Image (cartoon, grey):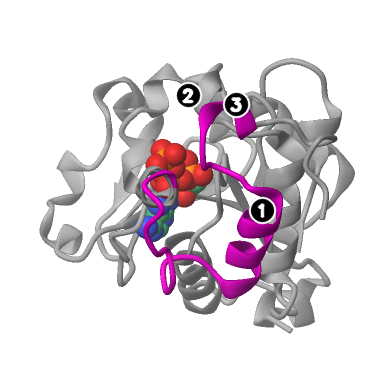
Amino acid sequence: MSEEMKRTGKRRIGLFGGTFNPIHLGHLRGAEEIREAFRLDGVIFIPSAIPPHKAMEEIIDARHRLEMVRLAIASNPYFSISDIELSRSGKSYTIDTLRHFRERCADSLFFILGGDAFVEIETWKDFQNLFTLCHFIVMARPGFQKTPLANRLPGALSSAFQPDVEAMTWVHSSGHRLVFKEISFLDISSTKVRELIERGESVRYLIPPETETYIHQHGLYRRREGMGDFSAQKG
Ligand code: ATP
């Protein structure tokens, strides 16, 4: 239990959105380091149904991605999964997901994302309002800490934030914080995993064994016509 929860009864919850196509050890290790560093009481993985920024033909059926996340996090009592973006119709916008959680719980919420996703944040729907809903934690690559605070924000955001130089964070006019946290970034991407599988090469030690077994059982990522058909690929 975090100190905040003991004091206020509020949990500290991380929200980790992604395509997870498929989930890999970079996602899992990043989430675990952030959980520990920020004393989060839990991290909720939120697979997106139709991500606004990605080419759909590369993305397999959401139910496969959800199941792979479920298997990958099963042994971690701090990790859980939400299918909120899958149960909503249309594109998965983070602003809608954050509103959903904000309206339904009084917990302190921390949206977790990678540095590569953060640099594109100005293209996200209603991006200015994202920061009115929760704190943001950006997982940064080693060495990032040397980047001066002033150079960490995209221009369109700078007027809404004040630097807290001592804490090396930005404080939004709503009071929420934007924190950059260096993690031991594993150079793994879902793209790389998909490419290896397509070429018939090993993905061992890049994804959890449970996920690997699932991919093989369902013949995922091997060839285009095998992708995305959940009903046809059982066992
Ligand atoms: P793709 O290669 O298909 O673009 P991806 O590996 O970037 O996928 P996503 O599901 O798009 O995976 O990422 C979800 C979130 O996890 C994003 O915020 C992304 O920045 C972050 N992330 C991706 N890879 C890593 C990694 N190796 N370490 C830490 N965070 C990561």
Provide residue 174's location: percent of width, then percent of height: 56, 37
For disc 2, the marked residue is: 54
Q: Quadrant of residue 107?
A: bottom right
The foreground one among 93 and 127 is 93
Q: In which quarter of the image is residue 162?
A: top left
For disc 3, the marked residue is: 225
Q: What stretch is highlighted in magenta?
A: 198-226
Q: Earlier in the sequence, mark 1 or mark 2?
A: 2
Looking at the image, which residue is at 30% across and 29% down? 158
Q: Do the residues labelled 1 and 2 touch (CB within 8 Å)?
A: no
3D distance between C-alphas at marks 1 and 2: 26 Å
Looking at the image, is mark 2 or mark 3 nearer the viewer? 3
Provide residue 178's location: percent of width, then percent of height: 42, 48
| Amino acid type of the residue that numbered disc 2 sits on in the rendered structure | Lys
Res. 184 mark: none
SS label for mark 3: helix
Looking at the image, which residue is at 75% across and 79% down? 77
Q: Check the image and report above or below for 220 versus 36.
A: above
Q: Check the image and report above or below for 54 versus 145.
A: above
Provide residue 16's location: percent of width, then percent of height: 59, 51
Q: Does the residue labelled 2 lie within 8 Å of ligand 1?
A: yes
Q: Is residue 185 magenta?
A: no
